[in-house]
Structure formats: C-alpha cells, structure tokens
Image (cartoon, rainbow, N blue to C red):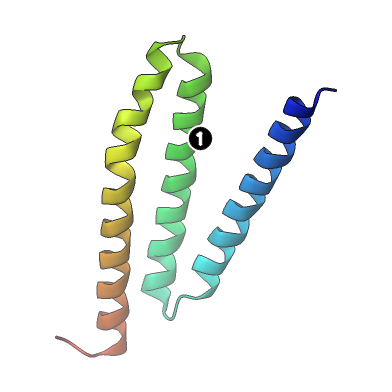
Amino acid sequence: MNPGLIGGLIGSAVGLLGGIVGTYFSIHNTRGPRERGFVIRASIATWVVLGAFLAALFLIPSPWCHLMWIPYGILLPIGIIKWNRTQARIRQEESGQEA
C-alpha cells in the first residue's frame, strides 16, 4: 500500500472515532430527559446529513462535487448555533429557571 492510502485510512478512522466519542459525550453530559432526547435526535440527524454529504462528494462527478462544500460551509455553522441555542433553552426550562 502506498503512504497516501494508509494516511487516508488512518485519518478517516481517527475522524470517525472522534465523531463517535463526541456524540457519546454530548449525550452523556446532558442533564435532563428532554435535553437528552433532543441531543439524541440532533445527533442522529447530524450523522445522517454528514453521511449524505460524504456520499454526494463521492457519487457526484468532479468538478461538480466540489459545489457541495458551499451549502455545507453555510449550513454547518447555522446548525451548530441552532443546536446550542435549543439545548441551552431546554436546559434552562428543565432547571426551572425561566429568564
């Protein structure tokens, strides 16, 4: 095997493991049942969307596949901000501290 292929496989494995560990701790660090339910649903949605994104990168012919990075670059930060705000709101509601 050539070094590029080995590096790609190792990098992919490390990235996947990082995603699994991050998902586990996101769910583990929730404080209430509604928050946990939200994080589980959001995590599943994120894994599905990222899987679809990667599938599109491999299945859409070049150079068109590179256009997939435009919606990814726009929607990823929006999704992160929405996730964080929703989780903070649920956490606040579950703690009984209305703002």
Who is closer to the viewer here, 2 or 66?
Answer: 2
**Residue positioned 50% across, 29% down in the render:** 54
Residue lying furthest right: 1
Tell me which amino acid carries mark 1. Gly
Answer left or right for 49 relative to 67: right
Closest to the observer: 86 or 19? 19
User: Which residue is at a point 45% across and 13% down the rendered structure image?
Assistant: 60
Is residue 38 left or right of 61 when viewed as pictured? Answer: left
Crowding near the residue tagged with mark 1, few <14, some 14–19, many ≥20 C-alpha atoms within 10 Å? few
- Give the percent coordinates (x, y) of residue 64: 38, 12
Q: Quadrant of residue 76?
A: top left
Percent x, y for residue 17?
Answer: 66, 51
Which residue is tagged 1? 51
Quarter the C terminus occupies: bottom left
The quarter of the rendered structure image containing the N terminus is top right
Q: Residue at x 41, y 79 (%)?
A: 32
Q: Element at badge 1?
A: helix
Above or below residue 46? Residue 93 is: below
In this rendering, the answer to whether 77 lies above or below 27 is above
Q: Residue at x 61, y 54 (%)?
A: 18
**Residue 63: x percent and y percent?**
41, 11
Q: Residue furthest front?
A: 3
Q: Front-most of 92 and 12?
A: 12
**Image location (x, y in percent) of residue 15:** 62, 46
Count of residue discs: 1
Q: Residue furthest left?
A: 99
